[in-house]
Amino acid sequence: MIRILRPRLFVQSIYDIDLDRLVDRGMRGLILDLDNTLIGWNQPQVPHELHDWLKAVERRRLKTCIVSNNVSQRVDRFSREVGIMAIARAAKPRRWAFREAMQRMGTHRHNTAVVGDQVFTDILGGNRLHLYTILVHPLSDKEFWTTRLVRRLEKAVLPNHETFRMGERG
């Protein structure tokens, strides 16, 4: 697999991320994708489980910023509801939104992780800046039509994509 497309860590969902281990690794900020990472694509309600996870993140003093390619209305509404700063229409994998998120959080490349469900947006964008990248399995099969097409390419570049070989790479 092309190294720039490979995440540092594969997990089933955000709930499987060992937050204490991230803190021990020196992480101070999390750049979070929205759709199919934190919440199902265009899902309006925020699950209680997500609120609890975000509180766990906050207890560990990890800063957070949502970086999404979705439209401002969707991203801003979610951001207000959960109390996390956000950047919409990010054009990932372009780097400007990742840099803007780090600036807002007061973090740097060496202490920021990116969490997302897409290789060609979240992981590629984070790896281009040498951030610690975490790939999660998409929450839902419902996605924007272009995302469904890109998923076919992901299967070609990710070994064991369907089973998500869990664990960390060196």
Image (cartoon, rainbow, N blue to C red):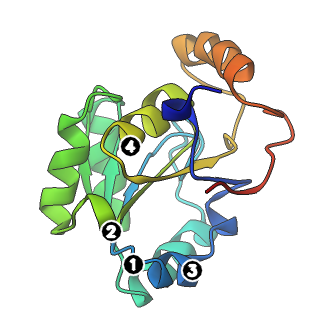
Q: Is 161 placed left or right of 24 in the picture? A: right
Image label count: 4
Q: Amino acid at mark 2?
A: Asn
User: Mark 2 or 1 closer to N-term?
Assistant: 1
Q: Residue at the spot x=81%, y=47% of the render?
A: 165
Structural crowding at the residue carrying mark 4, measured as other residues with C-alpha within 10 Å and reported as few (<14), some (14–19) or many (≥20): many
Are dots 4 and 3 in contact, CB under 8 Å? no
Structural crowding at the residue carrying mark 2, measured as other residues with C-alpha within 10 Å and reported as few (<14), some (14–19) or many (≥20): some
At mark 2, the secondary structure is helix
Q: Quadrant of residue 159?
A: top right
The residue tagged 2 is 111
The residue tagged 1 is 26
Are dots 4 and 2 in contact, CB under 8 Å? no
Image spot of residue 40 (x, y percent)? 60, 42
Q: Is 123 placed left or right of 73 in the picture? A: right
CA gap, disc 1 to disc 4?
Answer: 17 Å
At mark 3, the secondary structure is helix
CA gap, disc 2 to disc 3?
Answer: 13 Å
Image spot of residue 54 (x, y percent)? 47, 73
User: Mark 4 or 2 closer to N-term?
Assistant: 2
Q: Is residue 166 placed above or below 59 in the rendered structure?
A: above
CA gap, disc 4 to disc 2?
Answer: 12 Å
Kindly identify which numbered label has been placed on residue 21: 3
Q: Quadrant of residue 58?
A: bottom left
User: Mark 2 or 3 closer to N-term?
Assistant: 3
Q: Amino acid at mark 4?
A: Gly
Kindly identify which numbered label has been placed on residue 126: 4
Q: Quadrant of residue 142?
A: top right
CA gap, disc 1 to disc 3?
Answer: 9 Å
Image spot of residue 12 (x, y percent)? 74, 54
Are dots 2 and 1 in contact, CB under 8 Å? yes
